[in-house]
Image: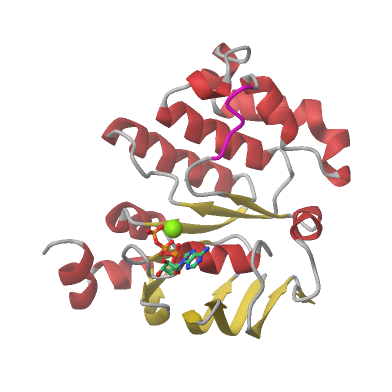
């Protein structure tokens, strides 16, 4: 579904991604794990065209993304839920969700998708009139994911959805990710919660200072010595 081939990227003079190869097959949950500054968010931003690679190619369902802008990849079903949620604080929960279906292809499904999001996140339904900025951190993450679902994603890019959440909310978020996947959405997940994300991933990549240093099935990486030492404190 998504193929990244020898992706290189620099912010100005500073190269931060080096020959990244990565693949996501339809129906999978794929996770990219790595420490702060490894280049996880930058990789996602290249996919969603928020930044543009210096060299290498990214194809989605056979189409090269190089010439496309971010709204065009959203139209094709490639939707990113950004790091730090980025919800609209002065808008209500419902208004935030509706903003997620701004693209033409998602507008006809707006009302059905609102219902779909509300059934997945009853908490959002209870608080549909509350201002986004007054929701708790965990609720805002639910809202950010719900807003992403409003765009009819085929591939959902999630950037650290569990960051800063209590153990209970972390558990809920990882359950929700699996539920979304079961409903037919392919997932590319970036996480620092290495244990949880490897547990739910079909396949995974380990990124270190802008390079892929390991890849394999989630269970392979969970039992890998380097992963255990570097990320799981074992
Ligand atoms: N806009 C920018 N301008 C210059 N350098 C940047 C910019 N954004 C990120 N970087 C640098 O690129 C490198 C990779 O950053 P990136 O945000 O992709 O890491 P990350 O793996 O997502 O880290 P974290 O887990 O902390 O979110 C870092 O060294 C960072 O300082
Ligand atoms: Mg990041």
Q: Is residue 101 above or below residue 73?
A: above
List x then y, in percent, for residue 125.
59, 17
Q: Nearer the viewer, residue 146 or 44?
A: 44
Q: Position of residue 208 (x, y in %)?
A: 34, 76
Which range is magenta? 86-90
In the rendered view, would you say 227 is above or below 144?
below
Q: Is residue 79 magenta?
A: no
Q: Is residue 116 above or below residue 156?
A: above
Give residue 205's quadrant in the image: bottom left
Ligand 2 visible in quadrant: bottom left
Give the mark count.
Answer: 0
Q: Residue 22: horizontal and vertical position, in percent?
A: 53, 77
Magenta part, dominant SS: loop
Examine the rendering and report whether any part of residue 224 can be seen: no
Q: Quadrant of the N terminus?
A: bottom right
Quadrant where the C terminus lies?
Answer: bottom left
Residue at (31% x, 65% y) in the render: 35
């Amino acid at each position: 579904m998504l193929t990244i081939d020898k992706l290189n990227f620099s912010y100005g003079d500073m190269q931060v991604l080096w020959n990244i190869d990565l693949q996501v097959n339809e129906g999978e949950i794929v996770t990219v794990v790595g420490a702060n500054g490894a280049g996880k968010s930058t990789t996602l931003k290249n996919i969603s065209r928020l930044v543009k690679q210096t060299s290498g190619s990214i194809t989605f369902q056979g189409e090269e993304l190089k010439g496309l802008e971010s709204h065009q990849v959203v139209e094709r079903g490639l939707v990113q839920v950004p790091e730090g949620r980025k919800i609209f604080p002065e808008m209500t929960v419902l208004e935030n969700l509706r903003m997620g279906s701004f693209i033409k292809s998602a507008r006809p499904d707006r009302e059905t998708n609102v219902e779909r999001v509300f059934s997945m996140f009853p908490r959002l339904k209870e608080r549909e009139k509350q201002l986004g900025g007054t929701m708790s951190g965990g609720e805002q993450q639910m809202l950010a994911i719900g807003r992403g679902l409003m765009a009819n994603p085929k591939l959902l890019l999630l950037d650290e959805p569990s960051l800063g959440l209590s153990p209970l909310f972390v558990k809920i978020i990882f359950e929700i990710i699996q539920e979304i996947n079961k409903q037919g959405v392919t997932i590319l997940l970036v996480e620092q919660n290495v244990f949880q994300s490897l547990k739910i991933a079909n396949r995974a990549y380990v990124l270190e200072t802008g390079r892929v240093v390991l890849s394999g099935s989630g269970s392979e990486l969970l039992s890998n010595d380097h992963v255990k030492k570097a990320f799981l404190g074992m």
